Image (spheres, coloured by chain):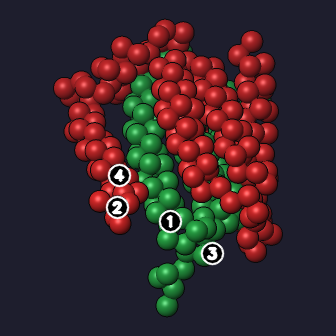
Chain colours: A red, B green
């Protein structure tokens, strides 16, 4: 069952990603990117990551997708479309080289050789993960409280930076 | 090869390569940003696959925490990147990255 879901989602995902790269129309590319984000959320569900799937739909498909469509609308140049540059063939070679290297390493490695489970918060498969992610984030000993606070400062800085960048300086 | 971590990692590798190809070849700055988002999604997919399959029958949540941090940084990156693109579009009337050459010597 999970295997079937994986194959369907994987096909749609790779097809949407390839279409994002190949389509001439930037707006359609943005819509297909949102489809790609949704299929990634589906893949997270097959990996027993329910909270991450919800976050993926909210942040990527919701926030980032809308932001990208907004930018496409603001900067759309119908004549130019979404062209390729001169590096089409070299970039294809480099991408295929990266893909071949990654697949070679993935297939050649024995992924079952973990001798002892690492000291991390874990959940049995098929259990909800949301409350345990809170433990993993905010635990006293093995939590990520300082990175969490740094991330909030980063978001604030990005927010202020984005507002400053797009502010119209002539009309105060 | 029975169904397992390899499938997810190869899917992640394919998604990453597609994003890399787009990021290297596109001339529209918004499209480059989209391809970078695809690459970040591929990395997140690999991280979540590792956290699920590293120990069988247990989901290790450190990977999920890292994926959440990557999503945070990706959101910040998208906001600032699109703000920069809109600022460039205002001054140059174009989002073609080959026209953004003010700093070229």
Could you say whether the residue bearing mark 4 is in a helix, strand or loop?
helix
Chain under disc 2: A
Q: Residues within 10 Å of mark 3 (few under 14, many from 20)?
A: few
Q: For the point 55% across and 18% down, which residue is it? A: A48
Up/down of B34 relative to A125, above or below: below
> What residue sits right under mark 1 in the picture?
B90
> What residue sits right under mark 2 in the picture?
A171
Of the two numbered discs 4 and 2 in the rendering, the one whose residue sits closer to the viewer:
2
Question: Residue A18's spot in the image, x, y percent?
Answer: 77, 47
Tell me how far mark 2 sits from mark 3, CA to CA.
29 Å
Q: Residues within 10 Å of mark 4 (few under 14, many from 20)?
A: some
Q: Residues within 10 Å of mark 2 (few under 14, many from 20)?
A: few
Q: Let me know if residue A117 appears in the view.
A: no
Label ID, residue B52: none
Chain under disc 3: B
Could you say whether the residue bearing mark 2 is in a helix, strand or loop?
loop
What is the quadrant of residue B62 in the picture?
A: top left
Tell me how far mark 3 sits from mark 1, CA to CA.
16 Å
Up/down of B12 relative to B36, above or below: above
Tell me how far mark 4 sits from mark 2, CA to CA.
15 Å
């Amino acid at each position: 069952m999970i295997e079937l879901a994986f194959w369907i989602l994987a096909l749609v995902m790779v097809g949407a990603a390839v279409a994002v790269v190949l389509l001439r129309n930037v707006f359609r590319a943005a819509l297909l990117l949102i489809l790609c984000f949704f299929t990634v959320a589906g893949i997270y569900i097959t990996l027993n990551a329910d909270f991450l799937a919800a976050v993926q739909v909210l942040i990527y498909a919701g926030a980032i997708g809308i932001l990208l469509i907004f930018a496409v609308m603001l900067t759309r140049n119908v004549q130019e479309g979404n062209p390729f540059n001169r590096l089409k063939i070299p970039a294809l070679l480099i991408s295929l080289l990266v893909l071949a290297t990654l697949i070679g390493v993935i297939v050649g490695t024995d992924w079952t050789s973990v001798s002892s489970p690492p000291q991390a918060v874990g959940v049995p498969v098929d259990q909800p993960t949301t409350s345990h992610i809170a433990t993993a984030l905010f635990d006293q000993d093995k939590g990520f409280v300082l990175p969490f606070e740094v991330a909030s400062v980063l978001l604030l800085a990005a927010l202020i930076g984005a507002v400053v960048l797009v502010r119209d300086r002539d009309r105060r | 090869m029975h169904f397992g971590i390899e499938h997810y990692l190869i899917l992640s590798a394919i998604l990453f390569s597609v994003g890399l190809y787009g990021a290297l070849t596109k001339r529209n700055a918004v499209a480059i940003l989209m391809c970078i988002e695809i690459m970040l999604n591929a990395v997140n997919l690999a991280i979540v696959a590792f956290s699920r399959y590293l120990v069988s029958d247990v989901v290790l949540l450190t990977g999920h925490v890292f994926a959440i941090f990557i999503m945070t940084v990706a959101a910040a990156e998208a906001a600032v990147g699109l703000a920069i693109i809109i600022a460039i579009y205002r001054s140059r009337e174009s989002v073609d990255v080959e026209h953004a050459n003010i700093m070229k010597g």
